[in-house]
């Protein structure tokens, strides 16, 4: 253990004490009955840990390449966190995904539920949810007092999310009550679970009222965060410094390129009907759909298991612990998009892909195949799961905390197109699904940058040329590229972009980085280029800032 590796392990241990919800997310025991302090004091304690760690990192001896890369990742991540703190991020952290409102719920999704002791810890943690939300409320009030205030739209989105978890939307069992009802134990433990569930539910209901009645009336109408905060977002989510206006122009070019591929695929599905006609067939043909979320999950589980078996040893080397990947239904109160959660450090909790039903009973299959590749293998589960297996090669920080969306989401989107290259999308239905996914991510680049920087739509475009982006202009444009999704998805997506500046561009910009690095390496090595070797050597480096990924892969070859 070098100084850098010891420092990284020490940091993760200390962070888990200060942030028990993150500890649960990482699968680290010993904290599952505790809650995170989201008050200003709690925020400052975590910031102090970051600062102390950075000072120690400056003094740590770098002994080898593993140390050098580990130090670069830790320094970049902690510097970005401090940059966000200085810009007031913790005092306005309202977002459908990137908010304590979600972090708290997700910790319960991932909490062990096998033994009576596990359920005791869940009961205790539920009873402490009011403390976590009270601390978060205190930080939001600090933001109101100091002018670091989230947009009104984000306050309303989070109020709706809290209302669902607080049992205020009616028509369904509240989330925490559902957890308590799922436990069959002695009367004492069952009653503690019910009491904890009531406390947590009431706390979320109170949070919803606070956001609606106190916070939203004081929040600004503008959704755009501006150039300074957007640059911080690029640093945080992608680990790179780039001109967002260059990326914006590239996004338009990329969208048009993909649309031409979509037109060709559509002609194979419904000759003469055009893209919209082909997509209508895919959405409405019962033979191309599955009825019921349980049958969908079973279908996706079979596809996932088969894909892992096919790719292992041929195109990738997939360690045995990663052969287990569970497909699950996402709980109420989540956003409308699918997502992945990583395995615990010891793989006792497997990786999981979560699919929100959102009231649907019939599920068209044309986009589900590429989504399974994106969220599972060769996408997130392979990349993130591999990091978890590198117990000696990577620090604990790299394996569990140092994930960059540009690296991970870029890889997952690259994985979708890779599966086409490998011959897994010969069915034109699934090919169009993959291309629709690509166009959707290119649209995100345009809308996310255009809206937050308040750029104009180029004069040569058919859609409102010359108009400056705002939420009302963006919604129909987003809807145009959400033809694969159910009602309400476009609105949920746009709300997400507004609440997580630059995260939405990480998919396509990250894929661009992976493709560029591959093209440069292929050109440099010529006939000696080996695709499997490129993939494994790059993935074995762990999640990196995109700038560092390019330096390490190309510099080593």
Image (spheres, rainbow, N blue to C red):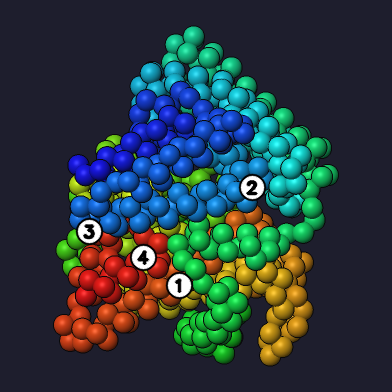
Please name the residue that numbered disc 4 is placed on.
548
Q: Is residue 319 above or below residue 511?
A: above
Question: How far across and how far down the image is residue 501, in percent?
Answer: 60, 60
Viewer-closest of 235 and 356: 235
Q: Would you say 232 lies left or right of 494 here?
A: left
Residue 341: which numbered mark, if any?
Answer: none
Please name the residue that numbered disc 2 is placed on.
88
Q: Nearer the viewer, mark 2 or mark 1?
A: 2
Residues tagged 2 and 1 counted as in contact (Cβ below 8 A): no
Helix, strand or loop status at disc 3 = helix
Q: Would you say 188 lies left or right of 400 here?
A: right
In the image, what residue occupies the spot 50% across and 19% down?
124
Question: How far across and how far down the image is residue 315, in percent?
Answer: 22, 68
Helix, strand or loop status at disc 4 = helix
Q: CA distance from mark 3 to mark 4?
A: 13 Å
Query: What crowding class fits label 4: few (fewer than 14 Cα within 10 Å), some (14-19), or many (20 or more)?
Result: some
In the image, what residue occupies the spot 75% across and 75% down?
468
Please name the residue that numbered disc 3 is placed on.
65
Tell which circle, 3 or 1, labels the residue nearer the N-terminal end. Answer: 3
Residues tagged 3 and 4 counted as in contact (Cβ below 8 A): no
Q: CA distance from mark 2 to mark 4?
A: 27 Å
Name the image quarter holding the N terminus: top left
Residue 434: which numbered mark, if any?
Answer: 1
Viewer-closest of 265 and 338: 338
Whether residue 77 is visible, yes or no, is: yes
Tell which circle, 2 or 4, labels the residue nearer the N-terminal end. Answer: 2
Q: Is residue 464 above or below residue 430?
A: below
Q: Is residue 212 above or below residue 470?
A: above
Residues tagged 3 and 2 counted as in contact (Cβ below 8 A): no
Q: CA distance from mark 3 to mark 1?
A: 37 Å
């Amino acid at each position: 253990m070098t100084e850098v590796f010891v420092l990284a392990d020490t940091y993760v241990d200390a962070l888990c004490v200060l942030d028990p919800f993150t500890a649960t997310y990482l699968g680290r025991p010993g904290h599952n009955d505790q809650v995170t302090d989201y008050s200003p004091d709690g925020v400052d304690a975590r910031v102090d840990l970051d600062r102390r760690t950075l000072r120690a990192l400056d003094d740590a001896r770098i002994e080898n390449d593993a140390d050098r890369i580990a130090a670069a990742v830790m320094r970049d991540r902690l510097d970005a966190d401090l940059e966000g703190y200085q810009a007031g991020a913790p005092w306005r952290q309202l977002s459908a995904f990137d908010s304590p409102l979600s972090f708290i719920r997700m910790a319960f999704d991932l909490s062990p539920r096998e033994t009576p002791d596990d359920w005791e810890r869940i009961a205790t943690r539920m009873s402490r949810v009011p403390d976590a939300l009270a601390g978060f409320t205190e930080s939001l009030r600090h933001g109101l007092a100091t002018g670091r205030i989230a947009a009104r739209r984000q306050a309303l989105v989070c109020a709706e999310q809290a209302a669902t978890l607080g049992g205020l939307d009616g028509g369904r069992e509240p989330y925490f009550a559902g957890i308590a009802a799922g436990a069959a134990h002695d009367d004492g433990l069952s009653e503690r679970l019910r009491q904890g569930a009531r406390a947590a539910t009431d706390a979320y209901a109170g949070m919803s009222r606070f956001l609606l009645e106190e916070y939203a009336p004081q929040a600004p109408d503008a959704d755009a965060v501006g150039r300074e905060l957007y640059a911080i977002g690029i640093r945080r989510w992608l680990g790179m410094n780039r001109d967002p206006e260059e990326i914006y122009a590239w996004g338009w070019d990329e969208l048009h390129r993909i649309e031409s591929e979509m037109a060709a695929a559509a002609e194979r599905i419904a000759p003469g009907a055009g893209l919209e006609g082909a997509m209508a067939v895919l959405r409405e043909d019962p033979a191309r759909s599955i009825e019921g979320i349980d049958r969908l999950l079973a279908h996706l589980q079979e596809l996932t298991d088969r894909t892992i078996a096919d790719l292992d040893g041929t195109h990738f080397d997939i360690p045995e612990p990663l052969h287990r990947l569970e497909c699950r239904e996402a709980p109420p109160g989540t956003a409308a998009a699918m997502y992945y959660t990583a395995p615990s450090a010891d793989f006792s909790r497997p990786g999981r892909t979560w699919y929100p039903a959102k009231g649907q009973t019939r599920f068209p299959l044309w986009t589900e195949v590429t989504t399974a590749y994106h969220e599972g293998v060769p996408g997130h589960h392979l990349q993130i799961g591999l990091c978890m297996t590198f117990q000696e090669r990577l620090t604990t920080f790299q394996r569990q905390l140092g994930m960059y969306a540009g690296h991970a989401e870029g890889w997952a989107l690259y994985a979708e197109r890779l599966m086409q290259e490998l011959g897994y999308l010969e069915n034109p239905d699934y090919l169009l699904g993959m291309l629709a996914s690509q166009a959707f991510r290119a649209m995100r680049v345009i809308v996310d940058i255009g809206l937050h920087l308040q750029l104009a739509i180029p004069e040569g475009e058919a859609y409102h040329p010359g108009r400056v982006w705002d939420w009302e202009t963006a919604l129909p444009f987003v809807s145009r590229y959400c033809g694969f999704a159910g009602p309400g998805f476009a609105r949920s997506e746009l709300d997400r972009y507004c609440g997580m500046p630059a995260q939405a561009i990480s998919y396509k910009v990250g894929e661009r980085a992976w493709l560029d690095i591959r093209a440069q390496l292929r050109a440099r090595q010529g006939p000696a280029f080996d695709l499997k070797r490129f993939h494994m050597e790059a993935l074995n480096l762990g999640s990196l800032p995109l700038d560092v990924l390019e330096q390490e892969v190309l510099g080593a070859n």
